[in-house]
Image (cartoon, rainbow, N blue to C red):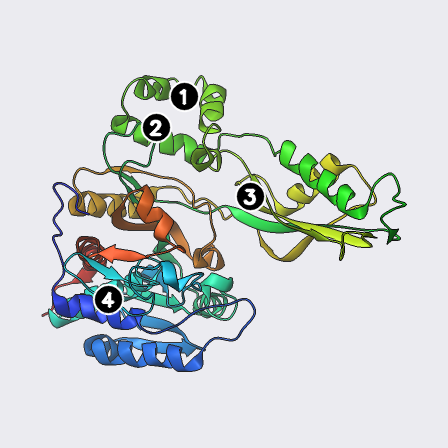
Amino acid sequence: MTATGTTATTVDDATAQRLAAALRCVTVSRDDADADEVEFDRLASLLDTEFPLVHTHLELERFGHSRLYRWPGTEPGTAAVLLAHQDVVPVDDEQRWTHPPFAGVVDDEFIWGRGAIDDKSRVLAILEAAESLLAEGRRPRRTVYFAFGHDEEIFGRAGATRMAARLRELEVRADLLLDEGGVITQGVADGATAPVASIMLGEKGWATVQLSTTDTGGHSSMPGRETAVGRIARAVARIQDHPMPLRMTPVIADMLARMRPAMAEPRRSALRLAPIAGGVITRMMAARPQTEALVRTTTAPTVIRGGVKANVLPQRAEALVNFRILPGDSVSGVLDHCRRVVADPRVVIEVLGTASEPSRITGPGPAFDVIADITRAVVPDAVVTTGIVPGATDSRHYDGLATTRCNFAPIVVDAADLERIHGTDERLSRANYARLIEFNRRVLAHYTSPGS
């Protein structure tokens, strides 16, 4: 895929093959198994070898397999913290892939493999950009950090949390925190006539709520008025049928205002009325799952189980409901909502495992303007807007370490490309990889001075 007017064209074979080699390292994160030490060591060795200037001039601290680089500046203070992660999600069905997911196949158009988009391409692109600037003798005016986690896909507890703690210990306060999250979509935003670059300023929280109930059991020929399975099914239905309220947040209002130039009529005129007809706009957004997630704490029942045999009354039943929490709502608010809606003291409602509150939303600010200007330089016809990440990223662990947070990478994708992330046939076009490297090079160049 290409975008009209872009300054990036493609990457040469050597650059593509460096990314492909990283994709061949099977650095999978699983909830139920330890990381494969050999594969993470293979990736570490690859990075050390392929980027010699980075590993000569930057300081590197390791936190397990996570890597925290410090590029010292010539002046006091910190300019930017760039995040990416080395781990990937497991593959569900390898037989459905065009190429084996860890083969790292490169053809004339694409680099194929798990992690091509999420997120090894960003690790490599940042290092490619830094290596080229070091070759030119450039050095930051103020210190820059790269933080590459190894367990983002399982919540970052051993990687990002430790690196963020180290930055707090060093009393780092940066202008910019840059991470994954937003992209440039083509034909995804309903009614948009131009590519839309969504530079996210924060992320939703999340919580998995467990509903459970117990009963005496017995033979199915003599059931009571309601079984444990029926009670849990009714509780899930009540939660699903009574979602949390729609709400327009300031960041989404800002997003819509910035998107107006990209919209065709009648949406362009409708968005002009957003300040006085916010409720109407919010209800319009709720009509599609992709946009409803921007104006509501979403409710997704994902697991229900109970019983052991068709003719045995279940003694226990349980269900899991996943919530992605809109800024302004909270984990405790989600629990209160569930208890109020279910209204059954026989159903125990509690958070399962780790939960995360919505992040603080940083204002656009000067650092946002830098990222927006660089985005327009790389993809000139893109309309730049703001937004929030519906999922979770390592950024949440770095809350408060930067004045402005931007979750964004300037790759141009359509709806089918988005389905490949965590899905089948993940791949990145050579043109998109060129954009990604050029973008990171320009970001870093903004904070560096020419060599003497």
Q: Position of residue 175 (x, y in %)?
A: 34, 54
Q: Nearer the viewer, mark 3 or mark 4?
A: 4
Amino acid at circle 3? Ile
Above or below, 176 relative to 364:
below
Q: Position of residue 351 (x, y in %)?
A: 67, 53
Please tell me the numbered disc located at residue 105: 4
Q: Are marks 1 and 4 in contact (CB under 8 Å)?
A: no
| Residue at screen point 45% across, 63% down | 152
Q: CA distance from mark 1 to mark 4?
A: 47 Å
Q: Nearer the viewer, mark 1 or mark 4?
A: 4
| Residue at screen point 24% across, 37% down | 195
Above or below, 35 relative to 239:
below
Q: CA distance from mark 3 to mark 4?
A: 38 Å
Q: Is residue 210 visible?
A: no
Compare residues 85 and 305 and report the one nearer the observer: 305
Q: Is residue 437 visible?
A: yes
In terms of secondary structure, where does tag 2 sit?
helix
Amino acid at circle 4? Val
- What residue sits right under mark 3 in the picture? 325
- What residue sits right under mark 1 in the picture? 274
Does residue 111 appear left or right of residue 8 in this picture? right
- What residue sits right under mark 2 in the picture? 257
Q: CA distance from mark 1 to mark 2?
A: 8 Å
Choose the circle earlier in sequence order: 1 or 2.
2
